[in-house]
Amino acid sequence: MDSQPPQSESLRERKRRETLARIAETGLQMFIDNGYDATTLEAIAAEAGISARTFFYYFKTKEEILQHFQGSGFYEALRPAILAVSPDQPPLEAVRDVLLGMVSRYETERSIVIDRLLRSNEALRARKQATFALMETTIFEALCEVWPQPERRDEHRMVAILSIGMMRLGMELWRQDGGKRRMADYVGDSFARLQSGV
C-alpha cells in the first residue's frame, strides 16, 4: 500500500501519512500477536504512542485498519478489466481469464495474514462474504455492458456467480495446500473442473 510520496508533499502531509502507516502497522501486529477480538483501539493507540483521540482521527474502527491493508486494487480493477474483454470470447472464459490474471494480487504474505484475520471473527467473515457478493454484482453489470442483449442477463448472472465461486474455491484450496503452487493454478483448476462438467 505504501507508495512513493509526491515531490510536492508538505511536511504536515508526510507526518500524517507516516502516522497513519504507524497506527495501521501497530494494529496489524497486535492483531497477529494478541488476536483481533482481544486487541482494543485504546491498546493500539497506546502502543503507537498516540492518544485515543488522535487514533480516531485516522481510524474509527479496528476493521478500518484491516481495510487499510486491502488496497491491492483487486475490486477496483475488476470492472475495467471485464469491460476490456473481447465480445467474441464466451463470457465465462472471459471472466476466468480476467480473474486468473488478477488473483496474484492476493498472493502476498500480508494478504494471507489479513485473510486469516478476516476469517477469525464472525463480523469480519460476514464482511468478507459481502465483498464477494459485491464482486458478483460488479461482474454481472460489466458483462451486461460487454454483451448488452437483454436475453443474456440470466446467463451473465450465472457466469458472475459461478466465477466468484470458482475463485473462492481455488483460493480455499490454495490455503489448504499451504500455497505449494501459484494461486492462479488452483483457481484455473477450479474453472477447468467446472467446464469439464465435474
Image: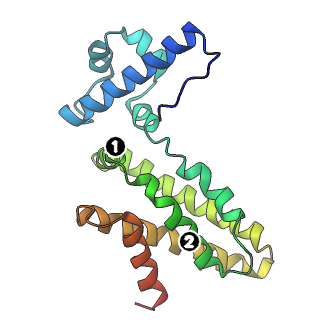
Residue picked out by circle 2: 97
**Looking at the image, is 191 positioned above or below residue 64?**
below
User: Residue 105's spot in the image, x, y percent?
Assistant: 46, 53
**Looking at the image, is 124 positioned above or below residue 147?**
above
**Looking at the image, is 10 positioned above or below residue 32?**
above
First reached walking from the N terminus: tag 2 or tag 1: 2
Mark number, residue 78: none
Residue picked out by circle 1: 110
Q: Element under label 2?
A: helix
Alpha carbon of mark 2 to alpha carbon of mark 1: how far? 25 Å
**In terms of image quadrants, where is residue 18?**
top left
- Residue visible at 50% across and 19% down? 17
**In terms of image quadrants, where is residue 139?**
bottom right
Image quadrant in which the C terminus is located: bottom left
- Residue visible at 43% across and 11% down? 54
What amino acid type should be assigned to the residue bearing mark 1? Arg
Q: Nearer the viewer, residue 10 or 36?
A: 10
**In terms of image quadrants, where is residue 84?**
bottom right
- Residue visible at 66% across and 82% down? 90
155 on left or right of 5: right
122 on left or right of 21: left
User: Residue 120's spot in the image, x, y percent?
Assistant: 27, 47
Farthest residue, direction bottom: 197
Q: Are marks 2 and 1 in contact (CB under 8 Å)?
A: no
Q: Say few, some or many: other residues with alpha carbon within 10 Å of mark 1 (under 14 / 14 to 19 / 20 or more).
A: few
User: Residue 29's spot in the image, x, y percent?
Assistant: 26, 30
User: Residue 92's spot in the image, x, y percent?
Assistant: 59, 78
Instruction: Count up the numbered dots.
Output: 2
Farthest residue, direction right: 149
Q: Say few, some or many: other residues with alpha carbon within 10 Å of mark 2 (under 14 / 14 to 19 / 20 or more).
A: some
What amino acid type should be assigned to the residue bearing mark 2? Asp
